[in-house]
Image (cartoon, coloured by chain):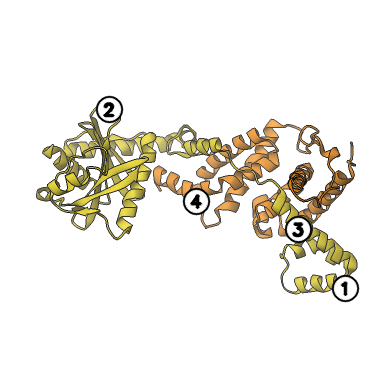
Amino acid sequence: MTEQTKAGRFREVVLVHLDAAYNLARWLSRSDTDAEDIVQDACLRALRSFDGFRGDSARPWLLAIVRNATYDWLRQNRKGAQEEPYDEEFHGGLDTVSFAAADTPGPEAKLERAELRRQIDDALARLPVAFREVVVLRDIEDLSYREIADVAQIPIGTVMSRLARGRRLLMTYLAQSKSGVRDGA
Amino acid sequence: MEHEEARELLTAHVDGELRGREALDVARHVEGCAECAVESASLVALRRTVESTATRFRAPAALEHRVRAAVAPSSPGEAAASSAATRWRRLAAASAFATVVAVAWGIGLVLERPSANDLLAEEIVSSHVRSLLSYRTVDVASSDQHTVKPWFSGKVDYSPPVHDLTADGFPLEGGRVDYVDHRPVAALVYRRNQHTVNLYVLPALAGSEEAAPVAVSRQGFHLLRWVHRGMTYWAISDVEWPDLTLFRAALLARE
């Protein structure tokens, strides 16, 4: 492949998954600007290894690269933060949330939906990153366990147990946000 | 199946990821176990809520531009990635090629550095391929330049020079209007043996100098671009390079 046809094919095959790449980087890094840098880095890595890409499932292939780029980035830029501490600023306002008027119709229902989204997003962002990534890949990116195993470089059994644990944690966080209780708060 | 064992598999069960005997065993257990039935139901509810509600972040437009620029051939990022050896080989091949062509056809040839013209080249390739795929490659079929040239008036806001090159082995087949570079553009269709040569003619940017031909290859097609008397020309075909340079020389001889 010449450099030019390679770049052309790369655009056709890979860049259509830019949203998925950004979504994963954004959820793992929890930062808009960091996610942009990470995705750009990941795309350059992907272009370099594009000659070795055989097959038609470009999305998991790209997401695996995005995942690695994200962890490299986090290691370099957030030293010692691998076990990410709970970020008060990012999750501010969670305490005041309540499901009390969930069945209210009209504009208030819309508001409730926005509140629900905020609760889900907050709970997801609170998950330790190892659980967060499998939940994001499964429930937002709709990947199969096999694909998640490839992306996260873990056995399928581990995908299963992390998803089970991650969802249980999610339920706990959501229950806490409903009752206004949170650990450490 | 034991309760604890089934409970471990509930997540995979609601995700539809269990197969064969295991799937059957868990399903049977859930039917007869109130605790697992309740947990399955809440897992399904949770999954649906996350699927439908959690934010799906979309790449900002600025990021897409950055990435497209970064992965363009020979961009700084890509150049940094390629080894000095690769660069040297590319340079050697390029200059060898340029020398051969320049000697053989008596014209200067500059190998293109990627630029805004890259995008236009991609568009030209797409337009060329579309014309080859479609039933009609021409909107006006005529080998008479005095029929084709007036046909463009009112369709594009300039008057492209039109020449029949039958005597040079490139019979004119007709003309077409394509949408390229955000505007309608005149395309002239020539034939070389069994091959189609598309010539796109559009006004050059104000103040453009006469420009020596620039050669690029895309997806197996050869493109030759030059500027002459206020017009930018893009010739594209799957003919060999010498034929394409001959085509240009024949056109220039008529101007």
User: CA–CA distance between discs 4 and 2?
Assistant: 36 Å
User: Label 3 sits on what residue type?
Assistant: Met
Q: What is the spatial separation of the Cα atoms under label 2 and label 1, in whole angstroms?
A: 81 Å
The dot on residue B32 is 1
Gap between marks 2 and 3 measured at Cα: 63 Å
Report the quarter where the C terminus of chain B lies: top left
Q: Could you tell me which secondary element the residue under label 2 belongs to?
A: loop
Identify residue type, mark 1.
Gly
Chain letter behind tag 2: B
The picture places residue B185, in percent across and down from the top left corner, at 29, 42
Crowd rating for badge 4 (residues with CA inside 10 Å; few <14, some 14–19, many 20+) = some
The residue lying at 74 percent from left, 49 percent from top is A106
Q: Chain of mark 1?
A: B
- Image position, residue A179 (x, y; %): 90, 45
**Relative image position of residue B18 (x, y in whole percent):** 73, 67
Task: Give SS at disc 4.
Answer: helix
Q: Could one spot residue A81 in this view of the protein?
A: yes
For the residue pair A49 and B132, the one nearer the viewer reads as B132
Q: Secondary structure at mark 1?
A: helix
Q: Nearer the viewer, mark 4 or mark 3?
A: 4
Residue projecting furthest to the left = B167
> Label 4, label 1: how many angstroms apart (C-alpha)?
48 Å
Report crowding for label 1: few under 14, some 14 to 19, many 20 or more residues within 10 A (C-alpha). Answer: few
Instruction: Please give the label number shown on residue B244.
Output: none
Distance CA(mark 3)–CA(mark 1): 23 Å
Letter of the chain in orange: A
- Figure quadrant of residue B26: bottom right
Chain painted in yellow in the figure: B
Query: Pointer 4 and pointer 2: residues touching (CB < 8 Å)?
Result: no
Task: Look at mark 3 in the image and give the residue it sits on.
Answer: A160
Q: Nearer the viewer, residue A73 or B42?
A: B42
Quickly name the residue at label 4: A13
